[in-house]
Structure formats: structure tokens, C-alpha cells
Amino acid sequence: MTRNVRSSAAKRIVWMFALALMIFNIAAVGAQDTEPIKVGILHSLSGTMSISETTVRDSTLMAIEEINAAGGVLGRMIEPIVEDGASDWPTFAEKARKLLLEDEVSVIFGGWTSSSR
């Protein structure tokens, strides 16, 4: 039962990634581009919310591994950049800013709770 739930959740995450990448047109620059697609993963890996958010991070990383193993997106690998929101909304804002401005990710996956968005 637990394995089926994980498998089902992983499939949903894989489809979520694929849809997000298409919506944001990340790979539209051209199939010739070999640079990896950087994506931010922003969840609480410490603090009170880490008990539920670390599994979301793990599932997201598993989905990225599956996509990369299948050849990536239009031949481009996905490069995850993981940050810890530390169960603290100001930290989430700081880490999101870093992911967007310094790491230049194309999209951020995270914001499990409404206060972290």
C-alpha cells in the first residue's frame, strides 16, 4: 500500500514537472542548447514543518532523477538547487530571492504552507 501511494505521488510530481516546464517554456530556447535547466526546490528541511516537507523534497528529487534518466527535457538535464526554508516565512522569502536572482533558476517548487508563499 505504501509503495503504491509513493509511486502514485511520484507520477503526479513527474507530470507536474513536465507541465510546469512546458508552461514556462523553459526549453523553448532550442534543442541545441545543452545547458541544464536549473530549478529551485524550496521546502522546510529543518524546523517544525520539516517532518512533512522533507518527503516532498525527496519526491521532487526522485522525479528529477527519473526525467533526467529518460533524457531530460528536449535533451536538457534538470539541475535541482535545494534550499531550506527552515519553517520560517522570512527565510522562505530570502531563499526564494536567492534562487531567482543569484542562482537564476527557471522555476521554484515549494511553498508547502500558505505562510511560506
Image: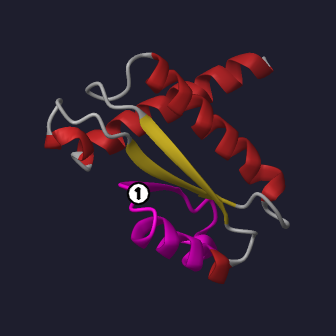
115 shown above or below 109: below
- Pinpoint residue 91: horizontal percent, then vertical percent: 66, 78
Q: Is residue 72 magenta?
A: no
Q: At numbered mark 1, what does the secondary structure look like: helix, strand or loop?
A: loop
Kindly identify the residue that appears in the image at 38 percent across and 19 percent down.
71
Image check: 29 left or right of 11? left
Left or right, 85 with reference to 35: right
Check disc 1 and give the amino acid type: Val
* Magenta-drawn stretch contains 105: yes
Above or below, comparing residue 10 to residue 98 in the picture: above
Q: Residue at x 42, y 48 (%)?
A: 38
What residue is disc 1 on? 105
Give left or right: position of 8 versus 99.
right
Identify the image quadrant of residue 18: top left
In this rendering, position of residue 71 left or right of residue 108: left
- Residue lying farthest bottom? 90
Name the residue at 61% across, 30% down.
62
Q: What is the span of residues highlighted in magenta in the rendered image? A: 92-117
| Residue 98 coordinates in the image, percent (x, y) | 51, 72
Q: Percent from the top left, x then y, of residue 92?
A: 61, 73
Residue 86: horizontal and vertical position, in percent?
Answer: 75, 69
Q: Give the colour scheme shown.
A: secondary structure
Return the residue nearer the eye: 91 or 55.
91
Where's the N terminus, which quadrant?
A: top right
